[in-house]
Amino acid sequence: METNKRYVTDSIKYIGVDDKDIKLFEGQYIVPNGMSYNSYLIKDEKNVVMDTVDKRATDEWVKNLENELNGEKVDYLVVSHLEPDHSYNIKLLTDKYPEMKIIGNEKTFGMINQFFDIADLENRKIIVKEADELNIGSHTLQFFMAPMVHWPEVMVTYEKSEKVLFAADGFGKFGTIETDEDWTCEARRYYFNIVGKYGMQVQALLKKAATLDINIICPLHGPILKENLDYYIGKYDTWSSYKPEDDGVLIAYASIHGNTKIAAEKLAEIFKEQGAKKVVLTNLVLDDMAEAIEDAFRYDKIVVAASSYNGEVFPPMEHFLNSLKGKNYQNRKIAIIENGTWAPSAGRTMRSIIEKMKDMKICENTITIKTTMNNENIEQMKELVKELLNM
């Protein structure tokens, strides 16, 4: 078993960089274990760079590239995705290697001028279409379009001789290459927060991938995948088809003064007493919103509990539900608990957002707490739990 986490094959070199200092990826996602910006060099009769890296990693990336080239030139740059964490150094590379050709699709070159002023671009660009091939010696690259996974210009590349799929943002995860952690949790959080809206497009890409004999998956973030590929592909199939991954319930609450929090904790106790397989509590005021979204997609049941606010709902809950809606959340069972002292409004506001989601089964009863939970509310919770578990 290969122990070098950066090893691809003898002729395909990893030249990416681990960013251990970044705190927020894309300005919003907490990454406690940093982020990798993956880039690869295929060495053959022609040398091909597969994507560049973020500006935060430029200097180290250039060193990695030059070390592997050992004085040789770059003949081609394949642009899988124009998002700046992968494309920032395109101009640097084009300036450094003026004879280098740039490979992308029509949408790539329709957008690239928004990012860079590349000298003689018209004579340097190679526009590829679905299933086009490029032979570079003993390696042959085949290109497949992956629009809206998760930008319109995205494409993936299959190297036919060594059976390597360069998967763009597909199969990526938060964390550095060297991070020793389970792939699934941070890959799930990455997928649903960044790619999750585009399940239909991911399904289309998976159908294309199913026609290929793949031994290695090289994503643009996270580890190189070499073993148990059916597991990773299976996860992507589940996630992108919006099927619940696990039997469990997420209780997501937004509490102003703590009373809704107390009710949510009591509800979790009742779920456990009534045999729920997995119960997860998340405080939408304090906890990582990206992880709350991940858990909402992971489990088949969800309870939203929130205080009323300004005649609507406490903003952290509104943000959570609108984020789910924006990421195409669907096909779940959901219950609603509202709190309000004089004119409870959270329930109707939450329901109005949920009803815009697809295939949501909403519990018939909404529990209304008037400031503090009482014995009647507890009995109502017991009935609500039975209803949700038996839907």
Image (cartoon, rainbow, N blue to C red):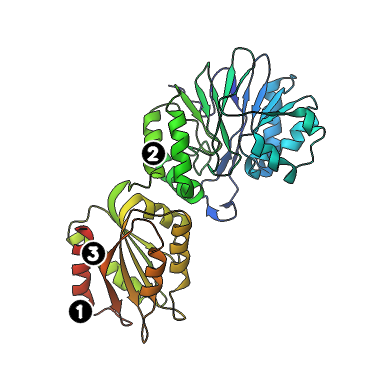
The amino acid at mark 1 is Glu
**Residue positioned most to the bottom:** 342
**Which image quadrant is residue 357 in?**
bottom left
Q: Judge depth for marks 1 and 2 and give the one in front.
A: 2
Residue corresponding to mark 1: 376
Circle 1: is it few (<14), some (14-19), or many (20+) Cα within 10 Å?
few
Q: What percent of the width, then of the height, locates residue 289? A: 46, 59
Q: Are marks 2 and 3 in contact (CB under 8 Å)?
A: no
- Secondary structure found at label 1: helix
Report the residue marked by disc 2.
237
Q: Is residue 365 visible?
A: yes
Observer-nearest of 385 and 203:
203
Number of marks: 3
The quadrant of the rendering that contains the N terminus is: top left
> Quick one: label 2 or label 3, which is nearer the N terminus?
2
Question: How many residues crowd around disc 3 within 10 Å: few (fewer than 14), some, or many (20 or more)?
Answer: few
Which residue sits at x=45%, y=43%? 200
Determine the CA span between mark 3 and mark 1.
16 Å
Question: Which label number is shown at residue 269?
Answer: 3
Task: Please indicate whether residue 384 sits to the left or right of residue 322 in the image.
Answer: left
Residue type marked 3: Glu
- Residue nearest the viewer, comparing 325 with 1: 325
Q: Residues within 10 Å of mark 2 (few under 14, many from 20)?
A: some
Residue 360, image quadrant: bottom left
**Residue at (47, 63) in percent of width and height:** 322
Q: Toward which corner of the image does residue 352 lie, by quadrant?
A: bottom left
Q: Are marks 3 and 1 in contact (CB under 8 Å)?
A: no
| Label 1, label 2: how far apart the Cα atoms are | 43 Å
